[in-house]
Each structure stands twice: as structure tokens, then as C-alpha cells.
Image: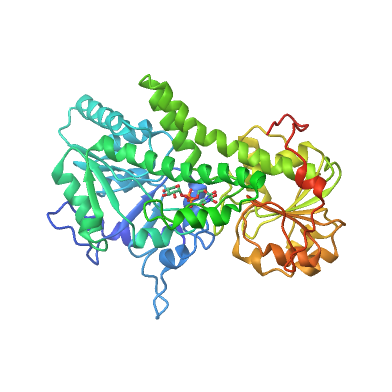
Amino acid sequence: ATEQDGLRGWEENPGKSIRIRQQSKILEEDFVVIVDMNEDRIKRWNSDELPIYEPGLMEVVKALLADGKQACRGKNLFFSTDVKKGIGVGKGRAADLRFIESVGRTIAQYANRSKIVIEKSTVPIKTAEAIARVLSANEAAAGGSKNFWILSNPEFLAEGTAMKDLDAPDRVLIGGQDQDAIQVLADVYANWVPRDRILTTNLWSSELSKLVANAMLAQRVSSINSISRLCERTGADVKEVARAIGTDSRIGPKFLNASVGFGGSCFQKDILNLVYICQQFGLEECAAYWQQVVDMNDYQKIAFTSKIIQSLFNTVTKKKIAVLGFAFKKDTGDVRETPALMVCDMLMKDGAIVHVYDPKVVIEDALTEFKYHDLEVNKNQLIFSKSPQEACDGAHAIVVVTEWDEFKTYDYKSLYDKMMKPAFLFDGRNMLDHAALVDIGFEVHALGKGQIKSSGGQSQIPDFVTRAGSGLLSGGYSP
Ligand code: UDX
């Protein structure tokens, strides 16, 4: 549907918006308008190339009925850049507008009656207070009498499983000062979420809970990653340790996969935000505690890449390295804060020619992320391949950075046959069958494991490799 087509139904029925009512049932005539000032993004939301990849998302946006009609986009779901109309008809979700304050001003400018304003993005604590002040100051200056109720309703969905998480959330959190406003939003969720999973809190608890949830999750990953390093030195196996501790119901099994490091747009940003808040209140020890979760993550990425360089006889200069996966996790094309960035950067700084294969990431997005981090890329050193075969052909090593399921299905024997020898494989997600790879002939390095033995019990890794410490490397990084 074109944007014009998409908006037709909305213009014809401007009064039939979701009303503030005691029992908010989602009615057939209700609809949602999503507004964003970014024209390009809205254009893509209205096309067959949605701006993000998420399993199940297209089906929901385009829900095609048996008769070929659309149930959602163009019928009761609209994407528009018309902020004025979006707010005017009774609702509007200014999607991720960067400057919260300007969103506040925009809402104040266009609201035609009292509104409930809901914070959905992760925002620094006390943002609601700032929005409330902007709204009431603007309203007073215009001599109006409209009310604005601010609610915090943080989003806990994870990328790659977003549609599932939205459909069946562990909990929905609504923070606010006004019980009636909270109730309106709680009633909307009650259409599909059991009441006992809808938690209500004060505004600040809600805002802080989002940061703390992410900080605690990231802390688990950093904790297990720190143990993976110890396992490599002691002969313990981090997978076995994770399983052993995860069966303690007080600890639980999730988020204990050792990795090359966590990425994504939330974890690091939220923890640094928490660190900043602690500092603001003079809580230096608390700030240092959470900072260490991020420091550990950087260390993990550096240590992983250092091991690659050391294993490849202390230099990767002019060597082709195949990197499998660039996204920060599987089932997404998102590269924000991906660990692949530092891995590739270190390899390139040491002179490697990096050939990346990722099922969803395009090189333009990768280059944008390098630029965002002020990292220069020599275009001859970073190549995005169309297939894993192309990436691995003539390579000295395979480096698994993202846990895409398809990486488990490759014919590693045929990849091995076309690689330089010795052929190395570094599994940054501990996801492949290591003994089988050793049987093929690979020298395999996994996370948090000592020497990898073949299925017949033979070690294929020369002693000097496993004994090599993690000394300083060139390129400005120190593990
Ligand atoms: C996270 C939170 O999970 C979600 O609730 C919040 O709303 C947004 O931030 P997301 O960033 O999409 O979601 O990804 P998540 O699944 O949490 O993974 C974050 C990173 O940690 C990824 O890079 C992932 O690969 C890594 N990770 C996760 C591990 O390295 N090991 C694990 O065991 C789990």
C-alpha cells in the first residue's frame, strides 16, 4: 500500500480513535497511527521492505486475510509522517524520536484535547518529569486547560523474538502517578495479557526497572564470560559449569551462554546510564560495580580476538579471515554495538583481510556502525561475501561471531578443503560440534574450553598454542 492508500481509512474515520474509557476493549473500528518524522523510515514501513527484520513482523503488519484483503496496515494500522494529525486524532506514538524534549513540545503544540502520554523507549530516569514540565509549561503559555498524564511503560521485548515477546510477555510494567490513567493502559493490555502479569508501580520505579533488568541480564553474560576465561586456564568446561549452576533453581539456566561478548542497542547504553545515575548521586562504588560489567565485556571481545591472532602464529597480516555473522545476535540484521565490530577492527588493524558472511546484514549498515564508533575502515580489508563458501575460500581461519542457526548446517568438510592449512576455527558462540570439526582436520578453539579433542580422543592442537599466554598485541588493544 502507498502512504496515500494507507491513510485513506484513517481520514474517513477521524473520530473513531481509541477513546479513554473505563473498560478499554479494542473494538473493530479502533486503529493505531504510528508517526515518525523520518520520512524514509515511514516510507519503508509502508512498503514490502520494512526498516527492520524481525521473524513474524511482516505477517502482523500485512496480515493478509484469505480473501487477499489486509487486516492491519491500511485498515487499522497506519504509518505516517503527519505528526500533527497523528496527535490530533487522539493518539500517536512518536516512534523513537531522539529528542524527548522536542517530542514533548510537538505533543503540546498539536494536542486538541487532554492526552495520556506514554514513554515506551528506554529513557533516562526522571524523563517523565521533564516531559510533564515541558507539556504543562507549553499548555500554560498557550492559556489552555488540557491535562497531560505521563505514564512509563518500558518495552522488555528482545530482538529476534519481538513478536513472541509482545504476544506473551513475562510481565507488562506500567508506572505513573495517576491511577485512572494507569488503568486505561492496563485495560488495553488486558485484552491479551493476564491481569496478574500487569504490574503497576510509581513512575520512577518503572523507569529504573528497565535499566536494572538489562543491567542484571548483561551482568549474567559478563559473569559467565569471566568464568569462561578461567575455564580456559584450568581445564574446566564453561558449558558444563553453566549447566551445573543453571540447574540451581535460584540461579536458573537462561543467559548463561558464554560468548564473544554481548551487543545490542540496550545493554551497554542502559548500564552506562545506570553508572551515570549512581555517579550523579555520589555513589561511586555502585557506579564502579556496574561499570565493571561493561569493562568485562570489552575484555572478552579483546581476549577472543587476541587468541585468534596469537594462534595464527602471532600475525594475521595479509591473511584472509572468514567471519561468520556480523549481527549482534541471531535472527536480526541489527549491528548496533555488535561484538563483530571490535573483532573485525582488531583483525584489520593487524593487517587481516576480513571476509564477512551474514544472512541479514548489509555492508552499508556495518560501515555506518564503524563510523559511529570513529573507527576507520580500509575498504580493501573489509569484504561482505554473498555466501559462506565465498567467505571461506582460501581463508586461514573461520571465526563464528553470531549464533545464526544455519551456521550449524554447513558442510564444514567442503569449507575445510578450500581453506589454507592449518585451517583454524574459532567458535565465539560455542555452537558447533567441535569434536566433529577436529575430526575433519580443523584446529578448533572454543570459549571456556581447554584443548578440543577429536571424537576418538586425539588432541589436534599443538601444545605451544594452548600454552601461549595472552600477552599484549599490536594495534593498541591490550587484553
Ligand atoms: C535486551 C533485553 O533482553 C530486552 O528485554 C530489552 O528490552 C532490550 O535489550 P536484546 O538487546 O534484543 O534485548 O538482546 P538479548 O537477547 O538480551 O541479547 C543481548 C546480547 O547478549 C546479545 O549480543 C546476545 O548474543 C548476548 N547474550 C545473550 C550472550 O552473549 N549470552 C547469553 O547467554 C545471552
Residue at point 53%, 53% (across, down): 241
Residue 77, quarter of picture? bottom left
Residue 414 picture location, percent across and down: 80, 69
Residue 23, quarter of picture? bottom left
As drawn, 458 above or below 468: below
Asked whether 323 or 47 is in front, the reply is 323
Residue 336, quarter of picture? top right
Residue 13 picture location, percent across and down: 26, 59
As drawn, 144 above or below 253: above
Asked whether 167 or 212 is in front, the reply is 212
Residue at point 56%, 44% (across, down): 227
Asked whether 362 or 414 is in front, the reply is 414
Q: Is residue 101 visible?
A: yes
Answer left or right for 193 relative to 43: left
Residue at point 47%, 53% (across, down): 245
Colour mapping used in the image: rainbow
Answer left or right for 299 relative to 283: right
Residue 158 picture location, percent across and down: 44, 53
Q: Residue furthest top?
A: 282
Answer left or right for 259 relative to 345: left
Number of marks drawn? 0
Q: Where does the C terminus fall, quadrant-wise?
A: top right
Residue at point 32%, 56% (across, down): 32
Q: Residue furthest bottom?
A: 67
As drawn, 361 above or below 454: above
Q: Is residue 112 visible?
A: no
Residue 243 picture location, percent across and down: 50, 57
